[in-house]
Amino acid sequence: MKITIYIILSFVFVEVSFGQDNIKQHKIDSLIAKLHADSSHIYRFRKVRPFFSLDNRNSFVKDAPVNVQGIQLGLILKERHTVGFGIYAIRTSARQKLTSKNEKNISANRTLSLNYLTIFYQYAFLDRRYFELDLPLELGLGSYNVRLTDAVTNKTIVDRKGGTVIVGGGIGCTVKPLKWFGISGSAGYRYDFDNNPNVNFSGFFYSYGVWIGLGRIYRDVRYFGIKRKKCRRHIHYILNED
């Protein structure tokens, strides 16, 4: 009789243990399935996502080196097409020789400034894990101010303001040895429709700098830093339940 009771209790204990293990495994499987679903959602193909870039270019105005400082905001469509607008500014100072009305040579200080707003389009011609090749185009409207002063007397000789239309295009490439970090560079030509020889903002430009994949950082933080960490914490809790 005692042996029979012992056997029955053993079977009951085994059934309860197996039942608890099945419940735990079911909970764990549900958590893993949810993690996979979260991963697919976070890293999904997105038709539209935001674009942001600090665009600092090196260029030349009347053979003098200048820095073109700008910022770009826009949208990336279907991971290939980027559209948006940019805000740029050029400041340059130099000295040049002028001929006065009485045909005397004058040394003058020339100050040029240009502020312009562009709309731009950029096509990702090649987009690979470690390398990206882009073809950007832009059209801009702006205003300029050119001022010439006598280097000796500091008297203003010319102070002219006006508007201009600028178009530009080129090629850009990004090398991405790391998922979040890379090196970018671009080169192109900017054409200014204003024919004033004292202005002439037309010229080649180039830039180089650091590329940081903010979108990839955001997605990885969401997945690895939040979702997966939370899933592991719940699984650890389930395994250690009494």
Image: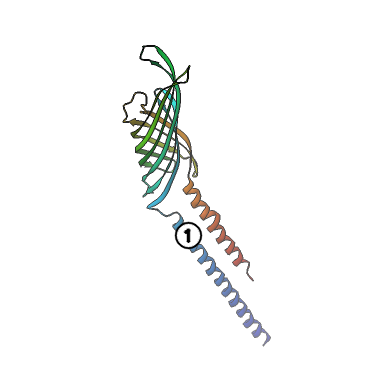
- In which quadrant of the rendered image does the C terminus lie? bottom right
| Residue 195 pos. (x, y %) | 31, 26
State the scheme by which the image is colored.
rainbow
State left or right for residue 196 relative to residue 150. Answer: left
Residue at (63%, 66%) from the top-left corner? Answer: 240
Total labels: the figure holds 1
State left or right for residue 155 relative to residue 162. Answer: right
Residue at (54%, 68%) from the top-left corner? Answer: 27
In the displayed orientation, state which residue is furthest to the right.
Answer: 2
- In which quadrant of the rendered image does the N terminus lie? bottom right
| Residue 82 pos. (x, y %) | 37, 45
| Residue 12 pos. (x, y %) | 61, 80
| Residue 220 pos. (x, y %) | 51, 51
| Quarter-of-image position of residue 155 | top left
Taking the image as drawn, is residue 124 in sight? no
Taking the image as drawn, is residue 111 in sight? yes
Q: Secondary structure at mark 1?
A: helix
Q: Is residue 150 above or below residue 175?
A: above
| Quarter-of-image position of residue 91 | top left
Which residue is at the front of the view, 212 or 168?
168
Q: Is residue 106 above or below residue 164?
A: above
Which residue, given by chain and number where applicable, does mark 1 sit on? 38
Q: Mark 1 Cα within 10 Å, few/some/many (few <14, many 20+)?
A: some
Residue at (60%, 77%) from the top-left corner? Answer: 16
Which amino acid type corresponds to the residue marked 1 in the rendered image? Asp
